[in-house]
Image (cartoon, rainbow, N blue to C red):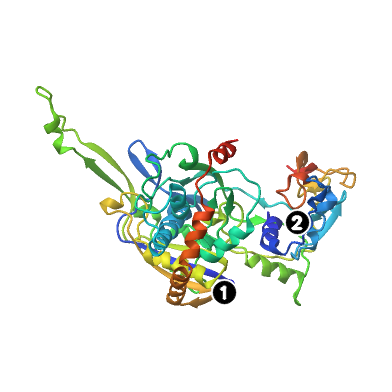
């Protein structure tokens, strides 16, 4: 099976205000931003971080697909779930690489070959380089030019400044049933808790590039299958309707556009064909740490 | 940084040069042989070391800041088997959530001076270098989550070799870490004594020695 260099170009269009935050000041959420150079000065432009997109767009839906197809729901330890859902952390000290285990894992689990993970005593590197989602605004021209295909238009004349895309939202939270818990003589407190933060307006567009170098067709299929399963949300407050994105993508293999559907089918067939072997590998590779292993990892 | 990126790219073709039968300590000679790795950068020899003819990265940091890389401890409760642990500690221990600071430098361009060499095919040294560089989409740490993206590589041909030393107003200026030895120019400027690894593999502790590095 030959390896190729795949690239995914993704366009996200916000269908609700985006609240992907980098922290808080008091009770105000601050938007995640990246510095970009524009006309000799630095602008802090809102962005979607590669770390968040790697987890929300690829790892979570990809692990959900695996857990569903392999029938793993209700049968995983905390370590095994963590390995599939977020990559896990090292829990044992070790200075050797089990090449056979790693190779079998790569063969059986394209999801892991794509995103990597950490077994108790060794790190398994992934092939995907998930780029930042760069906001399409006047100031981000250089950053966008670095990631989008050369034949994509770079219409500049009607782009707004990022400053005009940021707005403030505020919510209040009030507990209505507090009166029922009052004792005789207590005065009800009807003050409301205010919380809020900055958001990026609906209709904002982000472009993103994901590089997958030295990947098989089924590895690229794993990425596309995860994107198809993704619920399109990023950032916080999604239970209140924030952070919903409409996503479109284009898959390139060694520079030429390819159809994603056959690769997704190939990946799903691979998962089905290697179902038992993948389960056996997971239980063998991600075992419960021993007390001795945990102690040595801390030293 | 350039050469380490290239070498990690080509690492699968690295000849086996370690011999662990005689213990873990290696002399500098044990590691010489990396110049045979087919990268389009020429190598030179100084003080018994084979060193790539490439300068350190030169850039102007337009901004320096700290970004936080987080990894929350989320668990899919539906996936966990019954009878497992009832409580999972996420503020310490093996499932601790992390929020690690990363020093971020925003630089418009990074420049290296290097001596290219042709390898394979019929192309020139410059075209070999361009071909290899085009395959590198990102450099530095955390490239898996979007840092270190390279917009494009430009290779400009120049006549002078400024890979190790560049001409200064008074005396040669050091351009990369080199082993401290008698072969260094006596009037070298822009250099400070350090203890580091002057040649690949840069992660290998046993290659650390007295060096001079640019300052």
**Residue A136 can be seen, yes or no:** no
Compared to residue A29, the image places residue B129 above or below, namely below
Looking at the rendering, which quadrant does residue B155 occupy?
bottom right
Residue furthest out toward the left: A184
In front of the other: A178 or A155: A178
Q: From the top left corner, tell me how far across and down residue A32 is, in percent.
A: 42, 49
At horizontal 58% and vertical 40% (from top left) the residue drawn is A297
Compared to residue B177, the image places residue A112 above or below, namely below
At horizontal 81% and vertical 47% (from top left) the residue drawn is B26
Q: From the top left corner, tell me how far across and down residue A89 is, in percent.
A: 52, 46
- Marks 1 and 2: which is nearer the front? 1
- Can you identify the residue that label 2 sits on? B54
The N terminus of chain A, quarter of image: bottom right
Secondary structure state at the residue bearing disc 1 = loop
At horizontal 46% and vertical 52% (from top left) the residue drawn is A80
Secondary structure state at the residue bearing disc 2 = loop
Q: Is residue A195 left or right of residue A107?
A: left
Labelled disc at residue B120:
none
Q: Is residue A113 left or right of residue A188?
A: right
Q: CA distance from mark 1 to mark 2?
A: 29 Å
- Can you identify the residue that label 1 sits on? A254
At horizontal 59% and vertical 38% (from top left) the residue drawn is A296
**Mark 1 belongs to chain:** A
The C terminus of chain A, quarter of image: top right
Q: From the top left corner, tell me how far across and down residue B137 is, in percent.
A: 59, 62
Q: Same chain for labels 1 and 2? Say yes or no.
A: no
Please rate how many residues cluster around mark 2, counting C-alpha atoms within 10 Å: few if below 14, some from 14 to 19, many from 20. many
Q: From the top left corner, tell me how far across and down residue A14 is, in percent.
A: 34, 60
Looking at the rendering, which quadrant does residue A4 occupy?
bottom right
Residue furthest out toward the top: A185
């Amino acid at each position: 099976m030959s390896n190729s260099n795949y690239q995914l170009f993704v366009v996200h269009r916000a269908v609700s205000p985006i609240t992907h935050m980098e922290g808080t000041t008091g009770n105000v959420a601050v938007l995640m931003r990246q510095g970009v150079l524009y006309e000799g000065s630095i602008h802090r432009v809102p962005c979607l971080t590669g770390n968040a997109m790697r987890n929300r767009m690829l790892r979570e839906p990809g692990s959900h697909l695996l857990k569903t197809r392999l029938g793993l729901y209700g049968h995983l330890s905390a370590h095994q779930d963590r390995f599939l859902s977020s990559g896990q952390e090292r829990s044992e000290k070790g200075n050797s690489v089990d090449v056979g285990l790693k190779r079998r894992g790569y063969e059986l689990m394209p999801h892991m070959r794509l995103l990597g993970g950490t077994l108790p005593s060794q790190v398994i590197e992934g092939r995907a380089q998930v780029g930042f989602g760069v906001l399409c605004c006047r100031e981000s021209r250089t950053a966008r030019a670095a990631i989008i295909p050369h034949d994509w238009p770079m219409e500049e004349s009607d782009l707004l400044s990022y400053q005009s895309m940021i707005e403030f939202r505020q919510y209040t939270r009030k507990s209505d049933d507090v009166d029922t818990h009052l004792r005789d003589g207590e005065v009800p407190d009807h003050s409301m808790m205010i919380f809020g933060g900055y958001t990026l307006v609906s209709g904002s567009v982000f472009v993103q590039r994901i590089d997958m170098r030295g990947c098989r067709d089924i590895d690229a299929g794993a990425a596309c299958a995860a994107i198809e399963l993704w619920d399109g949300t990023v950032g916080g407050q999604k239970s209140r309707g924030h952070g919903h994105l409409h996503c479109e993508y284009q898959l390139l293999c060694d520079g030429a556009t390819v159809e994603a559907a056959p690769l997704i089918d190939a990946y799903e067939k691979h998962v089905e064909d290697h179902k038992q072997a993948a389960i056996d590998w997971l239980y063998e590779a991600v075992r419960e740490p021993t007390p001795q292993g945990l102690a040595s990892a801390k030293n | 940084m350039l050469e380490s990126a290239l070498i990690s790219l080509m690492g699968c073709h690295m000849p086996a040069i370690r011999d662990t039968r005689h213990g873990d300590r290696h002399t500098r000679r044990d590691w010489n042989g990396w110049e045979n790795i087919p990268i389009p950068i020429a190598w030179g020899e100084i003080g018994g070391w084979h060193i790539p003819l490439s300068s350190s990265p030169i850039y102007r940091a337009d901004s320096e800041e700290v970004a936080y890389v987080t990894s929350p401890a989320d668990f899919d409760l539906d996936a966990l088997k019954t009878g497992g642990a009832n409580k999972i500690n996420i503020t310490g221990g093996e499932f601790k959530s992390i929020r690690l600071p990363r020093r971020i430098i925003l630089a418009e361009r990074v420049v290296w001076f290097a001596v290219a060499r042709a390898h394979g095919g019929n192309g020139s040294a410059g075209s070999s270098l361009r071909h290899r560089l085009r395959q590198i989409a990102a450099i530095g740490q955390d490239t898996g989550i979007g840092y270190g993206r390279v917009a494009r590589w430009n290779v400009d041909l120049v006549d002078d070799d400024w890979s190790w030393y560049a001409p200064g107003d008074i005396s040669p200026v050091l351009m990369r870490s080199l082993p401290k030895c008698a072969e260094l120019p006596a009037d070298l400027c822009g250099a400070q004594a350090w203890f580091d690894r002057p040649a690949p593999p840069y992660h290998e502790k046993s290659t650390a020695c007295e060096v001079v590095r640019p300052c």
